[in-house]
Amino acid sequence: MTGKRRSEKFAFWLMRSITYVVVIFIAYIIFKILINGLPVISWNFLFSEPEKSGAEGGILPAILGTLYLVIGTILVALPLGMFSAIYLTEYAKQSKFTQTIRMAIVTLAGVPSIVFGLFGLGLFVITLDFGASIIAGSLTLACMILPTIIVASEESLKAVPKYMREGSLALGATKWETIYKNVLPYALPGMMTGSILGIGRAAGETAPILLTAAAFFLPELPSSVFDQVMALPYHLYILATQHPEAQKILPMQYGTALVLLLLVVGLNLFAVIIRIRVRRKYKW
Amino acid sequence: MAENQEIRSKIHVENMNFFYGSVQALFDINIELPEKKVTAFIGPSGCGKSTFLRTLNRMNDIIDGTRLEGKVLIDGGDIYGPITDVVELRRKVGMIFQKSNPFPKSIFDNIAYGPRLHGVKDKGKLMEIVESCLVKSALWDEVKDRLDKSAMSLSGGQQQRLCIARALAINPDIVLMDEPASALDPKSTLKIEDLIGELRKDYTIIIVTHNMQQAGRVSDNTAFFYEGRLIEYGATEQIFTKPNEKQTEDYITGRFG
Protein backbone atom coordinates (compact mmCIF):
# COMPACT_ATOMS: atom_id res chain seq x y z
CA MET A 1 0.00 0.00 0.00
CA THR A 2 1.41 3.38 -0.90
CA GLY A 3 1.56 6.20 1.61
CA LYS A 4 -1.00 8.13 -0.32
CA ARG A 5 -3.55 5.36 -0.18
CA ARG A 6 -2.87 4.73 3.47
CA SER A 7 -3.48 8.36 4.40
CA GLU A 8 -6.65 8.34 2.34
CA LYS A 9 -7.87 5.30 4.21
CA PHE A 10 -7.06 6.92 7.49
CA ALA A 11 -8.95 10.07 6.52
CA PHE A 12 -12.06 8.07 5.64
CA TRP A 13 -11.83 6.12 8.87
CA LEU A 14 -11.51 9.33 10.83
CA MET A 15 -14.51 10.94 9.14
CA ARG A 16 -16.61 7.83 9.60
CA SER A 17 -15.74 7.68 13.30
CA ILE A 18 -16.61 11.32 13.81
CA THR A 19 -19.95 10.77 12.13
CA TYR A 20 -20.64 7.83 14.42
CA VAL A 21 -19.82 9.94 17.47
CA VAL A 22 -22.42 12.52 16.39
CA VAL A 23 -25.02 9.84 15.81
CA ILE A 24 -24.24 8.20 19.15
CA PHE A 25 -24.83 11.45 21.00
CA ILE A 26 -28.19 11.98 19.36
CA ALA A 27 -29.19 8.35 19.85
CA TYR A 28 -28.23 8.53 23.51
CA ILE A 29 -30.26 11.68 24.12
CA ILE A 30 -33.32 10.28 22.39
CA PHE A 31 -32.93 6.90 24.09
CA LYS A 32 -32.60 8.43 27.53
CA ILE A 33 -35.61 10.67 27.08
CA LEU A 34 -37.70 7.82 25.67
CA ILE A 35 -36.80 5.38 28.46
CA ASN A 36 -37.50 7.84 31.22
CA GLY A 37 -40.29 9.77 29.56
CA LEU A 38 -42.50 7.04 28.11
CA PRO A 39 -43.71 5.63 31.46
CA VAL A 40 -44.94 9.10 32.42
CA ILE A 41 -46.95 9.67 29.28
CA SER A 42 -50.59 8.94 29.90
CA TRP A 43 -53.96 10.38 29.06
CA ASN A 44 -53.91 12.14 32.36
CA PHE A 45 -50.42 13.59 31.77
CA LEU A 46 -51.34 14.96 28.35
CA PHE A 47 -54.82 16.23 29.06
CA SER A 48 -54.91 17.57 32.57
CA GLU A 49 -53.61 20.60 34.40
CA PRO A 50 -50.50 20.55 36.55
CA GLU A 51 -50.87 20.16 40.29
CA LYS A 52 -48.53 20.94 43.17
CA SER A 53 -46.36 23.25 41.06
CA GLY A 54 -45.98 20.70 38.32
CA ALA A 55 -44.90 17.89 40.61
CA GLU A 56 -48.08 16.04 39.74
CA GLY A 57 -50.90 16.25 37.24
CA GLY A 58 -50.41 16.97 33.57
CA ILE A 59 -49.02 19.49 31.15
CA LEU A 60 -52.04 20.33 28.98
CA PRO A 61 -51.72 24.12 29.40
CA ALA A 62 -48.07 23.98 28.36
CA ILE A 63 -48.85 21.88 25.27
CA LEU A 64 -51.66 24.23 24.28
CA GLY A 65 -49.53 27.29 25.00
CA THR A 66 -46.74 26.06 22.76
CA LEU A 67 -49.25 25.28 20.03
CA TYR A 68 -50.75 28.77 20.29
CA LEU A 69 -47.30 30.33 20.13
CA VAL A 70 -46.37 28.20 17.12
CA ILE A 71 -49.57 29.06 15.28
CA GLY A 72 -49.09 32.75 16.04
CA THR A 73 -45.50 32.56 14.83
CA ILE A 74 -46.56 30.87 11.58
CA LEU A 75 -49.23 33.49 10.92
CA VAL A 76 -46.73 36.31 11.33
CA ALA A 77 -43.48 34.87 10.03
CA LEU A 78 -44.63 32.85 7.03
CA PRO A 79 -46.18 35.64 4.95
CA LEU A 80 -43.54 38.17 5.99
CA GLY A 81 -40.66 35.82 5.20
CA MET A 82 -42.08 34.52 1.93
CA PHE A 83 -42.93 37.93 0.55
CA SER A 84 -39.53 39.29 1.55
CA ALA A 85 -37.89 36.39 -0.24
CA ILE A 86 -40.02 36.94 -3.34
CA TYR A 87 -39.08 40.60 -3.33
CA LEU A 88 -35.38 39.91 -2.84
CA THR A 89 -35.04 37.21 -5.49
CA GLU A 90 -37.55 38.29 -8.09
CA TYR A 91 -37.86 42.04 -7.94
CA ALA A 92 -34.95 43.70 -6.17
CA LYS A 93 -32.03 44.70 -8.34
CA GLN A 94 -28.54 43.88 -7.15
CA SER A 95 -27.46 47.03 -5.37
CA LYS A 96 -25.75 48.29 -2.26
CA PHE A 97 -29.17 48.52 -0.67
CA THR A 98 -30.18 44.90 -1.25
CA GLN A 99 -26.71 43.75 -0.23
CA THR A 100 -27.22 45.58 3.04
CA ILE A 101 -30.59 43.89 3.50
CA ARG A 102 -29.04 40.49 2.88
CA MET A 103 -26.25 41.25 5.34
CA ALA A 104 -28.85 42.26 7.91
CA ILE A 105 -30.74 39.02 7.41
CA VAL A 106 -27.64 36.90 7.84
CA THR A 107 -26.65 38.86 10.93
CA LEU A 108 -30.14 38.46 12.33
CA ALA A 109 -29.77 34.69 11.99
CA GLY A 110 -26.73 34.81 14.24
CA VAL A 111 -28.24 36.90 17.03
CA PRO A 112 -28.55 34.89 20.30
CA SER A 113 -32.13 34.04 21.17
CA ILE A 114 -32.03 35.80 24.54
CA VAL A 115 -31.34 39.03 22.66
CA PHE A 116 -34.51 38.46 20.69
CA GLY A 117 -36.24 37.93 24.01
CA LEU A 118 -34.99 41.27 25.31
CA PHE A 119 -35.91 42.96 22.05
CA GLY A 120 -39.42 41.50 22.28
CA LEU A 121 -39.68 42.62 25.88
CA GLY A 122 -38.71 46.15 24.94
CA LEU A 123 -40.79 46.50 21.80
CA PHE A 124 -43.85 44.28 22.07
CA VAL A 125 -44.33 43.90 25.80
CA ILE A 126 -43.46 47.39 26.99
CA THR A 127 -43.47 49.93 24.15
CA LEU A 128 -46.48 48.50 22.29
CA ASP A 129 -47.99 47.57 25.62
CA PHE A 130 -49.09 44.04 24.66
CA GLY A 131 -47.88 42.82 28.04
CA ALA A 132 -46.43 39.33 28.37
CA SER A 133 -48.80 37.55 26.02
CA ILE A 134 -49.27 35.09 23.18
CA ILE A 135 -49.07 37.91 20.66
CA ALA A 136 -45.84 39.36 22.08
CA GLY A 137 -44.26 35.89 22.25
CA SER A 138 -45.36 34.98 18.72
CA LEU A 139 -44.03 38.23 17.31
CA THR A 140 -40.71 37.72 19.09
CA LEU A 141 -40.38 34.13 17.85
CA ALA A 142 -41.37 35.30 14.37
CA CYS A 143 -38.52 37.84 14.38
CA MET A 144 -36.14 35.11 15.43
CA ILE A 145 -37.04 32.66 12.65
CA LEU A 146 -37.58 35.24 9.89
CA PRO A 147 -34.02 34.83 8.58
CA THR A 148 -34.45 31.06 8.38
CA ILE A 149 -37.65 31.42 6.40
CA ILE A 150 -36.28 34.12 4.11
CA VAL A 151 -33.09 32.22 3.32
CA ALA A 152 -34.93 28.92 2.76
CA SER A 153 -37.50 30.64 0.56
CA GLU A 154 -34.85 32.46 -1.45
CA GLU A 155 -33.02 29.19 -2.04
CA SER A 156 -36.10 27.42 -3.30
CA LEU A 157 -37.06 30.36 -5.53
CA LYS A 158 -33.57 30.37 -7.00
CA ALA A 159 -33.83 26.63 -7.58
CA VAL A 160 -36.64 27.20 -10.10
CA PRO A 161 -34.73 27.33 -13.40
CA LYS A 162 -34.41 30.61 -15.23
CA TYR A 163 -36.01 29.16 -18.34
CA MET A 164 -39.30 28.75 -16.49
CA ARG A 165 -39.38 32.51 -16.02
CA GLU A 166 -38.15 33.34 -19.52
CA GLY A 167 -40.58 30.91 -21.11
CA SER A 168 -43.48 32.49 -19.30
CA LEU A 169 -42.39 36.09 -19.95
CA ALA A 170 -41.89 35.30 -23.63
CA LEU A 171 -45.53 34.23 -23.80
CA GLY A 172 -46.60 37.70 -22.74
CA ALA A 173 -47.01 37.08 -19.03
CA THR A 174 -46.35 39.96 -16.69
CA LYS A 175 -43.73 39.54 -14.04
CA TRP A 176 -46.24 38.85 -11.30
CA GLU A 177 -48.19 36.39 -13.50
CA THR A 178 -44.92 34.60 -14.14
CA ILE A 179 -44.05 34.42 -10.45
CA TYR A 180 -47.55 33.46 -9.41
CA LYS A 181 -48.23 30.85 -12.08
CA ASN A 182 -44.87 29.50 -13.09
CA VAL A 183 -42.44 30.02 -10.21
CA LEU A 184 -44.30 29.88 -6.90
CA PRO A 185 -46.05 26.54 -7.52
CA TYR A 186 -42.63 24.93 -7.90
CA ALA A 187 -40.91 26.88 -5.14
CA LEU A 188 -43.67 26.63 -2.56
CA PRO A 189 -42.86 23.14 -1.27
CA GLY A 190 -39.25 24.15 -0.63
CA MET A 191 -40.40 27.35 1.00
CA MET A 192 -42.78 25.38 3.20
CA THR A 193 -40.25 22.79 4.31
CA GLY A 194 -37.62 25.41 5.12
CA SER A 195 -40.19 27.37 7.06
CA ILE A 196 -41.45 24.36 9.00
CA LEU A 197 -37.90 23.58 10.09
CA GLY A 198 -37.61 27.15 11.35
CA ILE A 199 -40.93 26.85 13.14
CA GLY A 200 -39.77 23.62 14.76
CA ARG A 201 -36.90 25.58 16.20
CA ALA A 202 -39.25 28.29 17.45
CA ALA A 203 -41.36 25.66 19.23
CA GLY A 204 -38.39 24.54 21.28
CA GLU A 205 -36.93 27.92 22.20
CA THR A 206 -37.08 29.14 25.79
CA ALA A 207 -35.23 32.44 25.89
CA PRO A 208 -37.42 34.49 23.52
CA ILE A 209 -40.63 33.57 25.36
CA LEU A 210 -39.09 33.76 28.81
CA LEU A 211 -39.53 37.52 28.87
CA THR A 212 -42.43 37.94 26.47
CA ALA A 213 -45.06 35.24 26.88
CA ALA A 214 -44.43 32.40 29.26
CA ALA A 215 -45.69 31.88 32.77
CA PHE A 216 -44.81 28.92 34.94
CA PHE A 217 -48.27 28.42 36.29
CA LEU A 218 -51.62 29.86 35.29
CA PRO A 219 -54.89 28.94 36.93
CA GLU A 220 -56.79 29.20 33.65
CA LEU A 221 -56.19 28.52 29.98
CA PRO A 222 -55.65 31.69 27.93
CA SER A 223 -58.79 33.23 26.47
CA SER A 224 -57.27 35.85 24.17
CA VAL A 225 -54.01 36.58 22.37
CA PHE A 226 -53.24 39.14 25.04
CA ASP A 227 -53.10 36.48 27.75
CA GLN A 228 -49.95 34.88 29.09
CA VAL A 229 -49.44 31.21 28.39
CA MET A 230 -47.55 28.27 29.73
CA ALA A 231 -45.17 26.67 27.25
CA LEU A 232 -43.36 23.33 27.08
CA PRO A 233 -39.73 24.51 26.95
CA TYR A 234 -40.27 27.02 29.72
CA HIS A 235 -42.15 24.50 31.82
CA LEU A 236 -39.27 22.07 31.42
CA TYR A 237 -36.74 24.75 32.31
CA ILE A 238 -38.55 25.59 35.55
CA LEU A 239 -39.12 21.94 36.51
CA ALA A 240 -35.48 21.10 35.94
CA THR A 241 -33.77 24.11 37.47
CA GLN A 242 -36.09 26.27 39.55
CA HIS A 243 -38.35 23.75 41.20
CA PRO A 244 -37.69 23.22 44.95
CA GLU A 245 -37.91 19.47 44.47
CA ALA A 246 -36.24 19.24 41.07
CA GLN A 247 -34.64 15.87 41.83
CA LYS A 248 -37.87 14.28 42.97
CA ILE A 249 -39.83 15.19 39.87
CA LEU A 250 -37.40 13.84 37.31
CA PRO A 251 -40.10 11.71 35.60
CA MET A 252 -42.21 14.81 35.02
CA GLN A 253 -39.22 16.51 33.43
CA TYR A 254 -38.58 13.57 31.13
CA GLY A 255 -42.24 13.37 30.21
CA THR A 256 -42.28 17.06 29.28
CA ALA A 257 -39.04 16.72 27.34
CA LEU A 258 -40.45 13.79 25.41
CA VAL A 259 -43.62 15.65 24.47
CA LEU A 260 -41.56 18.64 23.30
CA LEU A 261 -39.23 16.38 21.36
CA LEU A 262 -42.14 14.60 19.69
CA LEU A 263 -43.69 17.94 18.75
CA VAL A 264 -40.51 19.21 17.10
CA VAL A 265 -39.72 15.89 15.42
CA GLY A 266 -43.32 15.73 14.27
CA LEU A 267 -43.02 19.15 12.64
CA ASN A 268 -39.79 18.15 10.91
CA LEU A 269 -41.31 14.88 9.74
CA PHE A 270 -44.23 16.83 8.33
CA ALA A 271 -41.73 18.96 6.38
CA VAL A 272 -40.00 15.88 5.00
CA ILE A 273 -43.29 14.34 3.90
CA ILE A 274 -44.32 17.50 2.06
CA ARG A 275 -40.97 17.58 0.29
CA ILE A 276 -41.15 13.98 -0.84
CA ARG A 277 -44.73 14.25 -2.04
CA VAL A 278 -44.13 17.39 -4.03
CA ARG A 279 -40.85 16.21 -5.47
CA ARG A 280 -42.76 13.31 -6.93
CA LYS A 281 -45.35 15.64 -8.41
CA TYR A 282 -43.09 18.18 -10.09
CA LYS A 283 -39.99 17.03 -11.85
CA TRP A 284 -37.88 19.07 -14.16
CA MET B 1 -29.88 45.72 -48.85
CA ALA B 2 -33.33 44.17 -49.08
CA GLU B 3 -33.63 43.13 -52.67
CA ASN B 4 -37.30 42.16 -52.84
CA GLN B 5 -38.88 45.58 -52.97
CA GLU B 6 -42.45 44.24 -53.06
CA ILE B 7 -41.87 42.50 -49.74
CA ARG B 8 -43.12 44.53 -46.81
CA SER B 9 -40.59 45.33 -44.12
CA LYS B 10 -41.64 43.94 -40.75
CA ILE B 11 -38.78 44.97 -38.52
CA HIS B 12 -36.69 48.07 -38.99
CA VAL B 13 -33.58 48.58 -36.91
CA GLU B 14 -31.72 51.86 -37.04
CA ASN B 15 -28.36 52.81 -35.52
CA MET B 16 -28.82 50.34 -32.70
CA ASN B 17 -26.19 49.94 -30.01
CA PHE B 18 -26.61 47.56 -27.12
CA PHE B 19 -24.78 47.38 -23.80
CA TYR B 20 -24.48 44.91 -20.93
CA GLY B 21 -23.50 47.39 -18.25
CA SER B 22 -20.41 49.10 -19.63
CA VAL B 23 -19.69 46.36 -22.17
CA GLN B 24 -20.98 47.10 -25.63
CA ALA B 25 -22.37 43.97 -27.28
CA LEU B 26 -23.87 45.37 -30.47
CA PHE B 27 -22.48 48.19 -32.59
CA ASP B 28 -24.52 50.39 -34.88
CA ILE B 29 -26.89 47.78 -36.26
CA ASN B 30 -29.02 48.79 -39.26
CA ILE B 31 -31.24 46.16 -40.82
CA GLU B 32 -34.66 45.64 -42.42
CA LEU B 33 -36.29 42.26 -41.85
CA PRO B 34 -39.02 41.33 -44.35
CA GLU B 35 -42.47 40.05 -43.47
CA LYS B 36 -43.30 36.35 -43.81
CA LYS B 37 -39.78 35.37 -44.69
CA VAL B 38 -37.20 33.38 -42.83
CA THR B 39 -34.13 35.36 -41.85
CA ALA B 40 -31.12 33.53 -40.42
CA PHE B 41 -28.57 35.16 -38.11
CA ILE B 42 -25.21 33.45 -38.31
CA GLY B 43 -21.81 34.12 -36.83
CA PRO B 44 -19.33 32.70 -34.34
CA SER B 45 -20.15 32.34 -30.64
CA GLY B 46 -20.29 35.67 -28.83
CA CYS B 47 -20.85 37.66 -32.01
CA GLY B 48 -24.08 39.17 -30.68
CA LYS B 49 -26.59 37.30 -32.83
CA SER B 50 -28.55 35.96 -29.84
CA THR B 51 -28.35 39.30 -28.08
CA PHE B 52 -29.76 40.96 -31.18
CA LEU B 53 -32.54 38.39 -31.40
CA ARG B 54 -33.46 39.05 -27.77
CA THR B 55 -33.71 42.80 -28.36
CA LEU B 56 -36.60 42.11 -30.73
CA ASN B 57 -38.95 40.95 -27.97
CA ARG B 58 -37.12 42.85 -25.25
CA MET B 59 -36.07 39.70 -23.43
CA ASN B 60 -32.85 41.49 -22.55
CA ASP B 61 -34.93 43.76 -20.30
CA ILE B 62 -34.92 41.08 -17.65
CA ILE B 63 -31.14 41.26 -17.34
CA ASP B 64 -29.98 43.96 -14.93
CA GLY B 65 -27.98 46.82 -16.38
CA THR B 66 -28.71 46.37 -20.09
CA ARG B 67 -29.21 49.44 -22.24
CA LEU B 68 -30.20 50.02 -25.83
CA GLU B 69 -29.61 53.05 -28.03
CA GLY B 70 -31.16 53.67 -31.42
CA LYS B 71 -34.45 52.48 -32.86
CA VAL B 72 -36.15 49.13 -33.22
CA LEU B 73 -39.45 49.42 -35.10
CA ILE B 74 -41.95 46.63 -35.62
CA ASP B 75 -44.71 47.49 -38.08
CA GLY B 76 -43.51 51.06 -37.81
CA GLY B 77 -43.93 51.27 -34.03
CA ASP B 78 -40.93 51.88 -31.80
CA ILE B 79 -40.84 48.88 -29.43
CA TYR B 80 -38.54 50.77 -27.08
CA GLY B 81 -40.78 53.83 -27.09
CA PRO B 82 -42.28 55.16 -23.87
CA ILE B 83 -45.80 53.93 -24.61
CA THR B 84 -44.81 50.41 -25.62
CA ASP B 85 -46.37 47.68 -23.51
CA VAL B 86 -43.74 44.94 -23.25
CA VAL B 87 -46.41 42.34 -22.51
CA GLU B 88 -48.27 43.27 -25.72
CA LEU B 89 -45.00 43.19 -27.65
CA ARG B 90 -44.22 39.67 -26.48
CA ARG B 91 -47.67 38.50 -27.52
CA LYS B 92 -46.86 39.67 -31.01
CA VAL B 93 -43.29 38.39 -31.01
CA GLY B 94 -43.04 34.78 -29.89
CA MET B 95 -39.81 33.10 -28.94
CA ILE B 96 -38.35 29.60 -29.08
CA PHE B 97 -35.34 29.03 -26.85
CA GLN B 98 -32.19 27.07 -27.45
CA LYS B 99 -32.93 24.64 -24.68
CA SER B 100 -36.49 23.43 -25.06
CA ASN B 101 -38.26 24.65 -21.96
CA PRO B 102 -41.59 22.93 -21.48
CA PHE B 103 -43.16 23.71 -18.12
CA PRO B 104 -43.58 20.73 -15.79
CA LYS B 105 -47.29 20.63 -16.56
CA SER B 106 -49.41 18.55 -18.90
CA ILE B 107 -49.05 18.96 -22.67
CA PHE B 108 -52.45 20.64 -22.75
CA ASP B 109 -51.61 23.07 -19.95
CA ASN B 110 -48.33 24.00 -21.58
CA ILE B 111 -50.03 25.18 -24.74
CA ALA B 112 -53.00 26.67 -22.91
CA TYR B 113 -50.64 28.70 -20.68
CA GLY B 114 -50.45 31.67 -23.05
CA PRO B 115 -54.11 31.80 -24.08
CA ARG B 116 -55.19 31.50 -20.43
CA LEU B 117 -52.93 34.45 -19.55
CA HIS B 118 -54.67 36.47 -22.19
CA GLY B 119 -58.12 35.69 -20.91
CA VAL B 120 -59.31 32.56 -22.75
CA LYS B 121 -61.19 30.50 -20.16
CA ASP B 122 -63.63 28.46 -22.20
CA LYS B 123 -62.52 24.83 -22.22
CA GLY B 124 -63.79 24.21 -25.76
CA LYS B 125 -62.00 27.24 -27.14
CA LEU B 126 -58.78 26.22 -25.37
CA MET B 127 -59.06 22.73 -26.81
CA GLU B 128 -59.48 24.24 -30.27
CA ILE B 129 -56.33 26.34 -29.84
CA VAL B 130 -54.33 23.42 -28.44
CA GLU B 131 -55.31 21.18 -31.31
CA SER B 132 -54.65 23.71 -34.06
CA CYS B 133 -51.25 24.65 -32.62
CA LEU B 134 -50.21 21.03 -32.22
CA VAL B 135 -51.26 20.39 -35.81
CA LYS B 136 -49.24 23.39 -36.97
CA SER B 137 -46.19 22.19 -35.07
CA ALA B 138 -46.59 18.68 -36.51
CA LEU B 139 -46.96 17.13 -33.09
CA TRP B 140 -50.70 16.40 -32.99
CA ASP B 141 -50.56 12.84 -34.25
CA GLU B 142 -47.89 11.92 -31.73
CA VAL B 143 -49.57 13.33 -28.64
CA LYS B 144 -53.32 13.56 -29.32
CA ASP B 145 -54.03 10.58 -27.03
CA ARG B 146 -52.04 11.88 -24.09
CA LEU B 147 -52.65 15.60 -23.81
CA ASP B 148 -53.02 15.24 -20.06
CA LYS B 149 -49.61 13.61 -19.69
CA SER B 150 -46.65 15.62 -18.46
CA ALA B 151 -44.75 17.50 -21.14
CA MET B 152 -41.57 16.23 -19.52
CA SER B 153 -42.39 12.73 -20.79
CA LEU B 154 -41.82 13.84 -24.40
CA SER B 155 -38.54 13.34 -26.26
CA GLY B 156 -36.21 16.30 -26.79
CA GLY B 157 -37.41 16.92 -30.34
CA GLN B 158 -41.03 16.63 -29.31
CA GLN B 159 -40.43 19.02 -26.43
CA GLN B 160 -39.04 21.61 -28.80
CA ARG B 161 -42.01 21.23 -31.13
CA LEU B 162 -44.26 21.56 -28.10
CA CYS B 163 -42.52 24.85 -27.31
CA ILE B 164 -43.16 25.97 -30.86
CA ALA B 165 -46.83 25.04 -30.48
CA ARG B 166 -46.91 26.94 -27.19
CA ALA B 167 -45.45 30.03 -28.84
CA LEU B 168 -47.98 29.81 -31.69
CA ALA B 169 -50.87 29.58 -29.23
CA ILE B 170 -50.70 33.30 -28.49
CA ASN B 171 -50.99 33.99 -32.21
CA PRO B 172 -47.81 35.98 -32.80
CA ASP B 173 -46.80 37.69 -36.07
CA ILE B 174 -43.13 37.08 -35.55
CA VAL B 175 -41.42 33.97 -34.23
CA LEU B 176 -37.88 34.30 -32.91
CA MET B 177 -35.88 31.09 -32.73
CA ASP B 178 -32.66 30.97 -30.76
CA GLU B 179 -30.73 27.95 -32.06
CA PRO B 180 -33.88 25.84 -31.82
CA ALA B 181 -32.26 22.62 -32.98
CA SER B 182 -28.81 22.86 -31.45
CA ALA B 183 -29.58 20.32 -28.73
CA LEU B 184 -31.40 17.88 -31.00
CA ASP B 185 -30.40 14.80 -32.98
CA PRO B 186 -30.31 15.05 -36.80
CA LYS B 187 -33.71 13.48 -37.28
CA SER B 188 -35.43 15.84 -34.86
CA THR B 189 -33.50 18.73 -36.38
CA LEU B 190 -34.87 17.84 -39.79
CA LYS B 191 -38.41 17.86 -38.40
CA ILE B 192 -37.88 21.32 -36.93
CA GLU B 193 -36.51 22.55 -40.24
CA ASP B 194 -39.49 21.13 -42.13
CA LEU B 195 -41.69 22.85 -39.62
CA ILE B 196 -39.98 26.19 -40.24
CA GLY B 197 -40.65 25.67 -43.94
CA GLU B 198 -44.36 25.31 -43.17
CA LEU B 199 -44.55 28.20 -40.73
CA ARG B 200 -42.97 30.73 -43.09
CA LYS B 201 -46.30 31.03 -44.91
CA ASP B 202 -47.95 32.64 -41.90
CA TYR B 203 -45.18 34.02 -39.75
CA THR B 204 -42.13 36.22 -39.98
CA ILE B 205 -39.39 33.95 -38.70
CA ILE B 206 -35.98 34.93 -37.44
CA ILE B 207 -33.64 32.11 -36.57
CA VAL B 208 -30.28 32.23 -34.89
CA THR B 209 -28.12 29.30 -35.83
CA HIS B 210 -24.50 28.27 -35.67
CA ASN B 211 -25.15 25.59 -38.22
CA MET B 212 -24.54 27.07 -41.64
CA GLN B 213 -26.09 24.22 -43.57
CA GLN B 214 -29.21 24.82 -41.57
CA ALA B 215 -29.19 28.52 -42.41
CA GLY B 216 -28.77 27.55 -46.05
CA ARG B 217 -31.65 25.10 -45.94
CA VAL B 218 -34.28 27.12 -44.10
CA SER B 219 -33.73 30.80 -44.71
CA ASP B 220 -34.53 33.34 -47.43
CA ASN B 221 -32.11 35.92 -46.12
CA THR B 222 -29.03 35.62 -44.01
CA ALA B 223 -27.28 38.15 -41.79
CA PHE B 224 -23.69 37.55 -40.72
CA PHE B 225 -22.57 39.00 -37.41
CA TYR B 226 -19.04 39.30 -36.14
CA GLU B 227 -17.84 40.88 -32.92
CA GLY B 228 -21.10 42.73 -32.36
CA ARG B 229 -21.34 44.15 -35.84
CA LEU B 230 -23.59 43.25 -38.73
CA ILE B 231 -21.00 42.45 -41.40
CA GLU B 232 -23.19 41.40 -44.27
CA TYR B 233 -26.86 40.90 -44.98
CA GLY B 234 -28.50 39.63 -48.14
CA ALA B 235 -30.28 36.77 -49.87
CA THR B 236 -29.09 33.50 -48.38
CA GLU B 237 -27.99 32.19 -51.76
CA GLN B 238 -25.84 35.22 -52.42
CA ILE B 239 -24.28 35.15 -48.93
CA PHE B 240 -23.38 31.51 -49.30
CA THR B 241 -22.18 31.59 -52.91
CA LYS B 242 -20.62 34.99 -53.42
CA PRO B 243 -20.32 36.98 -50.23
CA ASN B 244 -19.16 40.54 -50.63
CA GLU B 245 -17.11 40.68 -47.45
CA LYS B 246 -13.90 38.82 -46.80
CA GLN B 247 -14.92 38.01 -43.20
CA THR B 248 -18.18 36.46 -44.36
CA GLU B 249 -16.37 34.31 -46.85
CA ASP B 250 -13.82 33.20 -44.24
CA TYR B 251 -16.59 32.21 -41.87
CA ILE B 252 -18.72 30.45 -44.46
CA THR B 253 -15.82 28.47 -45.78
CA GLY B 254 -14.91 27.45 -42.27
CA ARG B 255 -11.66 29.34 -41.93
CA PHE B 256 -12.71 30.52 -38.46
CA GLY B 257 -15.63 30.48 -36.05
Image (cartoon, rainbow, N blue to C red):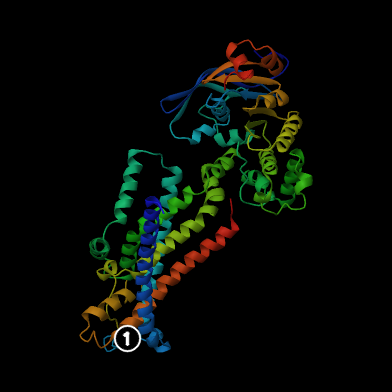
Residue type beneath disc 1? Pro
In this orientation, which residue lies closer to the viewer: B213 or A85? B213
Name above or below for residue B139 compared with residue B16: below
Q: Is residue A41 left or right of residue B12?
A: left
Q: Extreme front residue here?
A: A1
In this orientation, which residue lies closer to the viewer: B124 or A150? A150
Residue A58, quarter of the rendered image = bottom left
Q: Which of the image's four quarters has the N terminus of chain A?
A: bottom left
Q: How many marks?
A: 1
Tell me which chain the residue with mark 1 is part of.
A
In this orientation, which residue lies closer to the viewer: B161 or A89? B161
Name above or below for residue A134 compared with residue B166: below
In this orientation, which residue lies closer to the viewer: A231 or A237? A237
How far across and down, in percent of the image, does residue A143 sit? 33, 59
Tell me if residue A128 can be seen: no
Could you tell me which secondary element the residue under label 1 belongs to? helix
How far across and down, in percent of the image, does residue B225 sit? 57, 20
Q: Is residue A208 left or right of residue A284?
A: left
Q: Is residue A223 left or right of residue A273?
A: left
Tell me if residue A206 can be seen: yes
Residue under label 1: A251
How far across and down, in percent of the image, does residue A63 sit? 38, 78
Q: Residues within 10 Å of mark 1 (few under 14, many from 20)?
A: some
